[in-house]
Image (spheres, grey):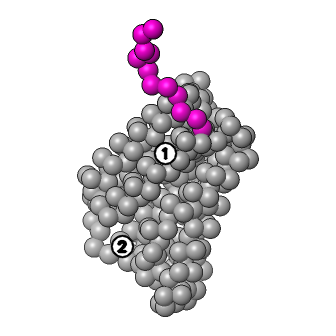
């Protein structure tokens, strides 16, 4: 009897484990290298994880990328981006919240570097890989097996942990956080824990947007707006 040309499908939980293993390796690479290496890594990891989803029997709909949902997702994305822009504008204008936008990473940044981050680094190096991984593949895999509630829990918890490495020096680069966490090792640890909890909570919101819209474009739009407009506000207020 001839063998099938296609590999045997793997189960949901082996696929989740494989996805997590890929993300652990990707997190280390993206934390150590930026620029072109980071962008290429993000694209390769996104494609690889979508392949894992398909290997487990998943579809484009499971990833939030069904053609029939893209227009709806785009409308959600545009509306959410507009809302974020309004919130950032108000926050930047109010003296009580303006200090939250201070970030030493913007010192010496040129307008060209800002545009590169807003239109390339953020959408490809951050939003693409994180949304495909957490609200696309992980959410889709667990949702098929255990439903939306558990999919949200698994995706959001892992999304929070994904931010441990990027938040290691958070208190040092954002002066507005020093009064809260201080400069001690304990303060740095508290800042990391707070970042994990905050991003896990944000992950719950992103998952709900994914569920309600039926499209990965909705959380992608919000994710891009929060990061990109944050760069713009920090750059203008430096």
- Residue at 36 percent across and 43 percent down: it is 43
Q: Magenta includes 13? A: no
Residues under numbered marks 1 and 2 in contact, where contact means CB atoms less than 8 Å apart: no
Can see residue 116? Answer: no
Can see residue 56? Answer: yes
Mark 1 or mark 2: which is in front?
1
The numbered mark, 1 or 2, whose residue comes first in the sequence reads: 1
Instruction: From the top left corner, tell me how far across and down residue 74 is, in percent.
Output: 55, 36
Q: Can you identify the residue that label 2 sits on?
A: 105
The crowding category of the residue bearing disc 2, from other C-alpha atoms within 10 Å (few below 14, some 14 to 19, many at least 20), is few
Determine the image quadrant of residue 34.
bottom left
Instruction: From the top left corner, tell me how far across and down residue 172 is, in percent.
Output: 43, 82
Instruction: From the top left corner, tell me how far across and down residue 4 is, in percent.
Output: 44, 15
Res. 18 mark: 1
The residue lying toward the viewer, choosing from 120 and 110, is 120
Question: Magenta stretch?
Answer: 1-12
């Amino acid at each position: 009897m001839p063998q099938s040309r296609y590999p045997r499908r793997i189960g949901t939980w082996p696929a989740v484990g494989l996805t997590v293993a890929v993300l652990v390796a990707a997190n280390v690479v993206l934390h150590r290298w930026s620029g072109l290496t980071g962008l290429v890594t993000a694209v390769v990891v996104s494609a690889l994880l979508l392949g894992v989803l398909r290997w487990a029997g998943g579809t484009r709909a499971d990833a939030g990328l069904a053609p029939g949902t893209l227009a709806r997702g785009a409308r959600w994305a545009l509306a959410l981006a507009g809302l974020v822009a309004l919130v950032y504008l108000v926050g930047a204008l109010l003296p009580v919240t303006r200090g939250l936008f201070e970030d030493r990473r913007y010192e010496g940044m040129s307008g060209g570097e800002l545009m590169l981050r807003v239109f390339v680094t953020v959408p490809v190096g951050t939003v693409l890989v994180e949304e495909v991984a957490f609200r696309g593949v992980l959410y889709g895999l667990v949702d098929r097996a255990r439903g939306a509630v558990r999919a949200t829990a698994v995706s959001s918890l892992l999304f929070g942990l994904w931010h441990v490495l990027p938040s290691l020096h958070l208190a040092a680069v954002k002066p507005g956080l020093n009064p809260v966490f201080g400069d001690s090792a304990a303060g740095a640890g508290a800042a990391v824990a707070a970042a994990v909890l905050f991003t896990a909570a944000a992950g719950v919101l992103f998952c709900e947007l994914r569920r309600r819209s039926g499209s990965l474009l909705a959380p992608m739009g919000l994710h891009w707006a929060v990061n990109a407009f944050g760069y713009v506000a920090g750059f203008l207020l430096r």
